[in-house]
């Protein structure tokens, strides 16, 4: 579980910085990171970083106002399910 949390944090940091880099590229009129790549990063596990970057950099707020929040909630539900499943197996598995 510790490795999962570390991976989750790293992936969100990468996603956060990708959104920031894309915003910088947009301001300087250079080739940008595709929306598909940004949304894929958010869906695969970087939704927390994507939401924070969206708010901090004010980036992609018109195009994706609710999509990132929906992804964030879905990932939270999956994370809670994994956490609770492991808790039940660890502490209640011997009773079953």
Image (cartoon, grey):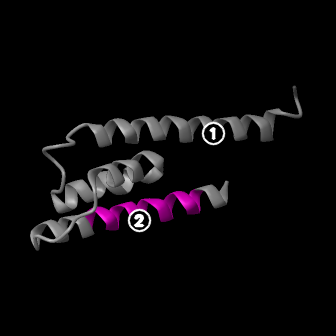
Label 1's element? helix
In the displayed image of the protein, which residue is found farthest to the front?
31
The residue mark sitting in front, 1 or 2, is 2
Q: Quadrant of the rendered structure where residue 53 is?
A: bottom left
Is 32 left or right of 1, judged from the image as shown?
left
Which of the pair 29/8 is nearer the observer? 29
Query: Magenta residues, as a range?
Result: 5-20
Which of the pair 90/39 is nearer the observer? 39
- Kindly identify the residue that appears in the image at 19 percent across and 65 percent down: 23
Q: Which quadrant of the figure contains the C terminus?
A: top right
Mainly helix, strand or loop, the magenta region?
Answer: helix
Is 20 left or right of 63, judged from the image as shown?
right
Q: Is residue 79 above or below residue 1?
A: above
Instruction: List the residue tagged with mark 2.
Output: 13
Instruction: List the residue tagged with mark 1.
Output: 82
Residue 32 percent coordinates (x, y): 22, 64
Q: Quadrant of the rendered structure where residue 59 is?
A: bottom left
Is 78 left or right of 23, judged from the image as shown?
right
Label 2's element? helix
Numbered badge on residue 57: none
């Amino acid at each position: 579980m510790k490795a999962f949390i570390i991976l989750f944090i790293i992936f969100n940091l990468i996603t956060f910085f990708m959104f920031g880099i894309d915003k910088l590229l947009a301001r300087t009129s250079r080739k940008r990171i595709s929306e598909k790549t940004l949304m894929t990063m958010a869906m695969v596990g970087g939704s927390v970083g994507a939401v924070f970057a969206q708010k901090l950099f004010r980036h992609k707020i018109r195009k994706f106002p609710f999509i990132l929040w929906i992804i964030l909630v879905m990932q939270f539900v999956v994370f809670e399910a994994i956490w609770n499943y492991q808790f039940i197996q660890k502490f209640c598995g011997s009773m079953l």
